Image: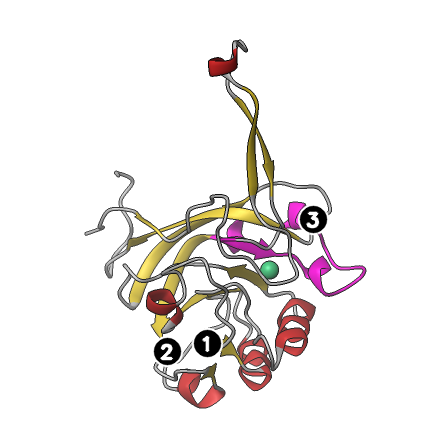
Amino acid sequence: MTGSWIDISVPIYPGMVHWPDNPAVRIERIQDLSRGDAANVSKLEMGAHTGTHMDAPRHFLADGAGLDELPLVTTIGPARVFPIVHPRTILPEELEAHRLRAGERVLFRTQNSERCWKDNRFVEDFVYISAAAAQYLVQLQVRTVGIDYLSVGGYVHDGVETHRILLGAGIWLIEGLNLAAVKPGAYELVCLPLRVVGADGAPARAILRPSGRGKASKAG
Ligand SMILES: [Zn+2]
């Protein structure tokens, strides 16, 4: 049994939330039918780490791989969504109970999903992955890590450290997910960031569907 696809990416629009020192989203009609042009054509302007996006190793490592080097298997395939109850930080102690496996794609559903996407204000005290939990994920050799706000690391604590630990170990990161409509469990994940050459990050569309216990069907 498989369910239908759930969109876990956030909408992109002018005025939407972004990391404080990153650029705002602008969408400008540079050709417009209403002005007599032959077509509507928009110019998109946004930071590479706004909304649902992926981080490449190059985000924090000068010689790291760019996002165009992302192996597709990183973000297409089985994934598990884990509930995080801690209201501030993901700690190794909480992860231990979940028995994460090597090679897994893991998505953390924290209070952020319900709390942080409600309006366009940047939330400073979002739930983040502590540096200690990042080390734990590296030790377990998970493949991919997803989080439900704009950064795997905190705004005040572990921002740089958590990124360096995960990206330095070859773990690819999906940030800016909204998992409010998703229950913890086993899913199929499809997440495709734009193929921007040498990019430190890029916007992505991410979808999940429940995989049940057996093999996923082709339909849907
Ligand atoms: Zn990022």
Instruction: Answer whether residue 146 is visible to the viewer in this image.
Output: yes
Q: Secondary structure at mark 1?
A: loop
Residue 6 locus on image (x, y percent): 30, 50
Q: Which residue is mark 3?
A: 199
Q: Secondary structure at mark 2?
A: loop
Q: Which residue is mark 1?
A: 127
> Decide: marks 2, 1 in contact (CB < 8 A)?
yes
* Ligand 1 location (quadrant): bottom right
Q: Nearer the viewer, mark 1 or mark 3?
A: 1
Residue drawn at 44 percent across, 90 percent down: 93
Where does the C terminus fall, quadrant-wise? Answer: top left
Q: Which residues are magenta?
A: 51-75
Disc nearer the start of the sequence (2/1): 2
User: How many discs mark residues in the rendered view?
Assistant: 3
Disc nearer the start of the sequence (1/3): 1
Instruction: Answer whether residue 71 is visible to the viewer in this image.
Output: no
Tell me the number on the disc at residue 84.
2
Q: Label 2 neighbourhood size at 10 Å, few (<14), some (14-19), many (20+)? A: many
